Amino acid sequence: MKLLDLTCDDPAMDLAVDEALLDEAEAGRLSDDVLRLWEPRRTVVVIGRSSKVAEEVNAAACRQRGVPVLRRCSGGAAVVGGPGCLMYSVVLGYDRRGDLRVIDHAHEFVLGRVAQAIRRLGPPATRLGVSDLTVGDRKVSGNSLRCRRDHVLYHGTLLYNFPLADVAELLGTPPRQPEYRDGRSHTDFVANLNVPVDDLRAALIEAWSANEPLTNWPRAAAERLHAERYSRDEWNRRL
């Protein structure tokens, strides 16, 4: 597996890079699976492909603070990222793991690998709900996926030292909640891993055996997606 450790100045470009990696894999221009690690340089709200801004985001608070609201290519609900929240992405080929075509198998495989990495650092991470990782009953990671013909993009958040009050301030009450949340507020639901980010990065790299750097990442394709989609209100505010 190849490793791309890349954070862009613009979080919209970061979202474009994820989709560009999936596109490159589908086009046969990536010979290996890829693990990408990045961490937004500033606070950002990222909503799912089919999310409705009015239902999931406190738009007034985002406007007041100048926090961008961006839409990713995968499903799921809104998340808040920024310094203190490590993002990871994996692009996996079905030719190596055909069972990943089944969505629940993809959740089980990827989250099992990520949880294993976290547990090596101490926190007893487990999967709860469809695609959450928790420590106890507190959510530390939200995840989503985008399936294509021959590959899957699976990506998620890892809260390690994030200002959790931002989650309550910038997000609304989610319209869909996992049963284990039991109606709790954001403040009572999310938590940090409280582990050093360098250790977290190293554990993920080891868990995925991502030993070689990806040097030819698809910059031009990502820039095109950024210009045509991720930087535009027609995409980010379409619902």
Image (cartoon, rainbow, N blue to C red):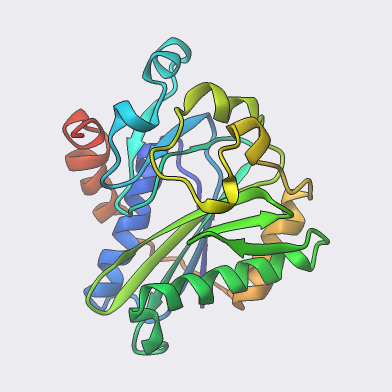
Out of 136 and 46, give the one closest to the viewer.
136
Out of 112 and 23, give the one closest to the viewer.
112
Residue at left offset 59%, top offset 52%? 180
Out of 57 and 4, give the one closest to the viewer.
57
Q: Residue 165: x and y, percent?
A: 63, 25
Q: Is residue 7 above or below residue 111?
A: above
Residue at left offset 37%, top offset 56%? 18
Q: Quadrant of residue 210?
A: bottom right
Residue 6 lies left or right of residue 165; in this view the side is: left
Q: Residue 152: x and y, percent?
A: 35, 71
Residue 172 lies left or right of residue 196; in this view the side is: left
Residue at left offset 61%, top offset 73%? 113
Observer able to see residue 178? yes
Q: Residue 29: x and y, percent?
A: 28, 75
Q: Is residue 206 above or below residue 166?
A: below
Q: Is residue 239 above or below residue 181?
A: above
Extreme residue toward the right, this view:
122
Residue 191 lies left or right of residue 99; in this view the side is: right
Check the picture and name the quadrant holding the C terminus: top left
Q: Is residue 29 above or below residue 199?
A: below
Residue at left offset 33%, top offset 53%? 75
Observer able to see residue 84? no
Q: Residue 139: x and y, percent?
A: 63, 48
